[in-house]
Image: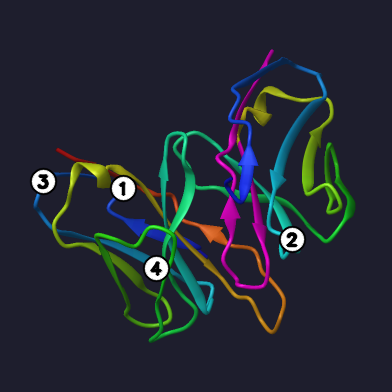
Amino acid sequence: NAGVTQTPKFQVLKTGQSMTLQCAQDMNHNSMYWYRQDPGMGLRLIYYSASEGTTDKGEVPNGYNVSRLNKREFSLRLESAAPSQTSVYFCASSDPEGSGWETQYFGPGTRLLVL
Amino acid sequence: QKEVEQDPGPLSVPEGAIVSLNCTYSNSAFQYFMWYRQYSRKGPELLMYTYSSGNKEDGRFTAQVDKSSKYISLFIRDSQPSDSATYLCAMEGGSEKLVFGKGTKLTVNP
């Protein structure tokens, strides 16, 4: 099992360019998440998908769009990149059932630099 | 006030020391309390979790939750250089969304 995979590992963009960060999980999890991690700010939730076909905004959704393509894949798109979006982006997945909570498994991250 | 507060450190200790990492929170709805460990340039991985108040031990690691004080702790006994990482507390209160602390960077010196 590869767990959660993310591509690319590193990307440099110019202001105004667009790009899509890809995430896939092979654990048959229902829920998937996108976070950004900035120095001194911790992990902040951008978007969340509880199941295929559903998405929900997190704490910092502005400037991003997401697509839950199928159960395995959850992509994050920056339509017009800004320097403030320079960050490390993590995808995660989990399988909470009923009223319980399950571990979130994280990918290795994508480092994005916007010039 | 942020929902979850965590001292970012950095914290530097000699090998073999007992390490105490702490978080405070303000949301009474939190029921699940987690500690994630993140090595440099890697994704976070779950270290321990507890449900409601009490203690949980796993080898050299002990997690404590005091819901009356809204305070959680992670203790590391006999710390090793391999424990050098950033430790993130996280909490969840029924929404399936985690709220993370900012993380504490720990260095254990040989």
Q: What stretch is highlighted in magenta?
A: B87-110
Kind of element beneath mark 2: loop
Which residue type does callout 1 highlight?
Answer: Lys
Task: Give the residue drawn at x 49%, y 48%.
Answer: A43
Q: Name the mark on residue A15.
A: 3
CA distance for labels 1 and 2:
38 Å
- Where's residue A83, x and y in %? 20, 42
State whether residue B47 appears in this view: yes
As drawn, B50 above or below B18: below
Q: Name the mark on residue A9.
A: 1
Q: Name the residue under label 4.
A: A24
Does B49 lie within the magenta span?
no
CA distance for labels 4 and 1:
13 Å
Residue under disc 4 on the same chain as residue under disc 3: yes
Residue under disc 2 on the same chain as residue under disc 4: no
Kind of element beneath mark 3: loop
Which residue type does callout 2 highlight?
Answer: Ser
Residue under disc 4 on the same chain as residue under disc 1: yes
The numbered mark 1 sits on a residue in which chain? Answer: A
Kind of element beneath mark 4: strand
Say which quadrant the C terminus of chain B sits in.
top right
The numbered mark 4 sits on a residue in which chain? Answer: A
The numbered mark 2 sits on a residue in which chain? Answer: B
For this orientation, the residue located farthest to the right is: B54
Instruction: Identify the image quadrant of residue A27.
Output: bottom right
Task: Give the residue drawn at x 43%, y 81%.
Answer: A71
Residue under disc 2 on the same chain as residue under disc 3: no
